[in-house]
Each structure stands twice: as C-alpha cells, then as structure tokens.
Amino acid sequence: MSNTTISQPVAYRGVSMTPEQRKVVFAASLGTAFEWYDFLLFASLSPIIAAKFFAALPSDLAFIFALLAYSAAYALRPLGAIVLGRLGDIVGRKFTFLISVSLMGAATFLVGILPDYNTWGLAAPIALLTLRMVQGLSLGGEFGGAATYVAEHAPEGRRAYFTSWINCTAAIGFVLSLIAVIGVRSIMGEAAFGDWGWRLPFIFSLALLVVSVWIRLSLSESPVFLELKRQGKTSKSPLIESFGNLRNIRLALAGMFGVIAGSAVLSTMGLIYPLLFLSQTLKVAPLTTNVLAGLAILVSLPLFPFSGWLADRFGRKPVIIVSCLIGAVSYFPVVKALTHFANPAYEQALASAPVTVVADPAQCSFMFNPTGTAKYLSSCDIAHGALARAGVNYTNVDAPAGTEAYVKVNEVRVDGFSGFELAPAQLKARTDEFNKRLIGAVRGAGYPEKADPAQTNLAMTWLLMLYMAALAAMSYAPVSAVMVELFPARIRYTAMSVPYHLANGWVAGFLIPAVFALVAASGNIYFGLWYPVAWAILGAVVTLFFVPETKNTDFRNWH
C-alpha cells in the first residue's frame, strides 16, 4: 500500500476534547450500549428460552441448544464485520451505524413477540436462530465502527482512554438487560415472568431502537473519513486491501490470537460465566444471581476508563498482558471459592458423595456441538450430559464393549439407556425418567436441590464476582485503541473488525459450550476452566512477542 498522509483534523489538536467531541463519545457509546443490551439479554434469559423454544428436547439438552443459539450469533459476527465493515470504509461510519442499530433493535423486538414451540412447533426454534443470526450480523459491524469513529475524533495521547468508553458498553448493556429482567421479574413474580413476562425486556428494545436511531442521526461523520473522501483516497476494496498483503495479515492474526482472544475470554468470564455458574450449577435463585451480577458489573465500570488511562500512560501491551496472566492464575481458586461461599452444602456433597459412571469408552463422546446438529444418544453421553448439567463431579470407569452405561451414587445404581432407536417422544420420556431417578439418588447423597439462602455468603460471593468483572474491565479497555492503531485509516473499519469478531465469535462465543463439553468429558465441574485459562495464557504470550506497542503510533501517516 502506498504511503497515505491525511491532513490533521481539528480532533487531533489539544489535550482534551471539545463539547462536540464529548458528544461523539457519549452518543457512540450509548448507542453501542443499547446494542449490547439487545445482544446479551438472550444470555440472562437462556434457561427460560430453552424451555419455551426447545420444549421437545429433554431439559438438559434444551439448555445446551439454547446456549448454542446464543453462540450462533457470535459465529455470524465475522460476516457482519466483513459486510458492514466494507460499507463503513466505502460509504462512511455514520451510515453504517444506522444500519447496524436498526437491524439489532428490530431482531430483538421480534424475539419478544415470537411464538414458542407449543404454538409454532419446529418453526419456532428455526425463527429464533434466524433472529440470533441477524443480531450477530448487526453486532459484527457495530463495535468496530464505534471504536473507529471515536478513535478518529479523539486527541493524540488519549485514544485508549476515550475508546475505553466504547469497550465498557458491553458491560453497560449487560447491566441494562439485568435491570430490565430484575425489574419485570420482581413486579410480576416468577410464575408470570416464566410464562410470558420474559418477553417484555425484549419488547422494550423497540424504545431503545428509537432512541439509538435518533442519537446516531445527530452525529456528524468522522473527520478522518471526510478528509479521506475529500482527497479521493477512500478504499474501493477494503477486504482485499486489509488482508491482501502479509503485513496486514500478520498484524490481524497477532491481534486476533493475542490482544482480542485473551481479553475476550476474560470478558466472558467476567460478564457471562458467573451468572450461569451460580444459577445452573450452584442453583442460586435467579433473582439473587441477577442482582449480584448486575451490581458487580456496575461497580467495575469505572475501571474501564482507568485502564484506558493506564494504557495511554504506560502502553497498551502491559495492561493487557498483566490482566490475562492474573486471570489465568486465579480462575480456578476464584471459581472454587464461589462454590464455597454461594452453596457450601453443595461443596460438601462434592467432597463426600462419590459418583461413578461405568461405561464402554467407545460410546463416550466429546460433547462439543457448536453447530447444534450433533445428537448424543449413547447411554454414556446421556449419563454424562445429565450429570454435567446437574453440576455433579464423577469418575469414569471403563466397562466391557457394548455395556450400557450406569451411574453409581455412593451405593445406589441408576441404569442408563441408549436413545438411538427411540422416537423423539419416547426419548424425551425415557430421558425425563432417567433424570428423575438420577436426581433422586443425587439428592439422597446430599446434593441440595437449591442453594440455601441462609447459608449463602452474599458479600463474599459478590466480591468474587466483582473481581472477575474487574479483570474483564482491565483487560478489555485498551483493545479498541490497539486494533484501530494497527491499521491505515482507509481500511481501518474492516481491518480491525474482522479479526476482532473472529476472536470474539469463535473463542469467547463458544466458551460456555466448550466449558460444558470439558466438564462432561472429565467429570469435574472445574475442568472446563482450562479453556479460558489456556486462551488467556496464549493471549498474553502472543501480545508480548508479536503485537507491536501502538501507544505512540502516528494516527495520520500510514504505509
């Protein structure tokens, strides 16, 4: 690529932003927060969505499919980055903003009025998956555009600080979604909320859509893009220019497997994982879990701009590397401490009630199913899935070939079954009956049905969740600054968006299903933590050795 010099716009002068520039940061951040509200609402309501849209499946499989529907949106984010990134580099940042926010708001509203499985049958989960894909496409073009837009308005020396407000919008959007869920749930009660009230937070997104479009219409175009357009130097083929030479490919891969992958798993571990671990594994009441998660994320928000300030002062790489290494070292003890303080009776049962799965190893699969097409119907897989969903540790013991799996809980034996020859209705009935017997044996061994509120240490549980949210904030805040500074202005939207959403979609997006698969394969509820730990270590190493420090990059002169 030839050397391109862009005339210095007003946005680069001085050490602080003008009122107009502050409006840019606020408007872009708020609009993105609304998009994340829409996107993450699905995560907090996934248990209810499982029951409503995958009702034909056994409860444990239904929840897995709901998680896979959630992950499907992550898988489509790279395609959204390509399509909307191209528009952003050719047509403009503002126009692309309007498209992305409109798609997200419309899709979320439609989820709120979508008939469930009992009304539409198989068409209901298909329509739900389609709307999730639209959300993924939308978000694929949103985040890179917002980061690029704010960075191109920010003064030199403060880009990490100002773009950190964009990075915190995921947390803000998640808090907004939790507030909506908690509010409706508290007013309506659990029965009505589970019946139809869960739809209201999705329907509320229509109001957010109107506000977001109004905000985006009030913005002016990026001064850097206007200067490129004035000089006739906008890209004609952003994707080819972005990844048609070795330099950009090398930077994209380094950013994807280093900066983004490491911080993305820390973000998911801070925002999503504690919510699901407490509610699904430790059986803490959903309202309590939502309140604790919302407060932890809310208190961690100031760490985003603080981390951005640190990155402007000391460099982007040290902040990201240190955060990733701290996360890798601490996740196992922190999650075990969550079990200790949130449900001590459950912790005691894990230690005192041995559970064994006796099965032919040839029948035992690694239950990672990102496409949602695989079926795990062997007796071993059915037993593993039920125990993993129940959050019960177990040991695998090999049985002779062809043996149907069975589970031993202390001295109680629960015989499994194969589902290969069963019709869907028979499979559901047999699975429900097996789960009933298995859960009965587990409860008899001391595993509590729910966490006892009187035994839950709310203060310590919240502090541990705050710690995980704080790590997410510290690692994630400088990411936008690094990625926009790696690439030329003419292709910046596309070049930073594609690797960003590839890493988020395929690394962080499948974190929860991957954790479940590792738990089911190993029999240890903590074994799945090796997935985020491995990615955090890889992110730190790649960032250290292969990502250049971009703190002093000249944002206007490119090769």
Image (spheres, rainbow, N blue to C red):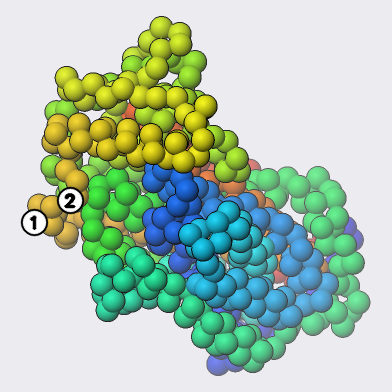
Towards the viewer: 428 or 29: 428
Q: Amino acid at mark 2?
A: Ala
What is the secondary structure assignment of the residue under circle 1? loop
Image quadrant holding the N terminus, namely bottom right
Please name the residue shown 55% across and 92% down the image.
19
Q: Position of residue 242 (x, y in %)?
A: 80, 56
Q: CA distance from mark 2 to mark 1?
A: 9 Å
Towards the viewer: 103 or 33: 103
Image quadrant holding the C terminus, namely bottom right
Q: Amino acid at mark 1?
A: Ala
Can you name the residue that lies furthest to the left here? 454
Please name the residue shown 54% across and 53% down the image.
69
Please name the residue shown 33% across and 17% down the image.
358
Please name the residue shown 13% across and 57% down the image.
453
Q: Which residue is mark 1?
A: 454
Q: Position of residue 403 (x, y in %)?
A: 41, 12
Whether residue 459 appears in this view of the structure is yes
Q: Which mark, residue 451?
A: 2
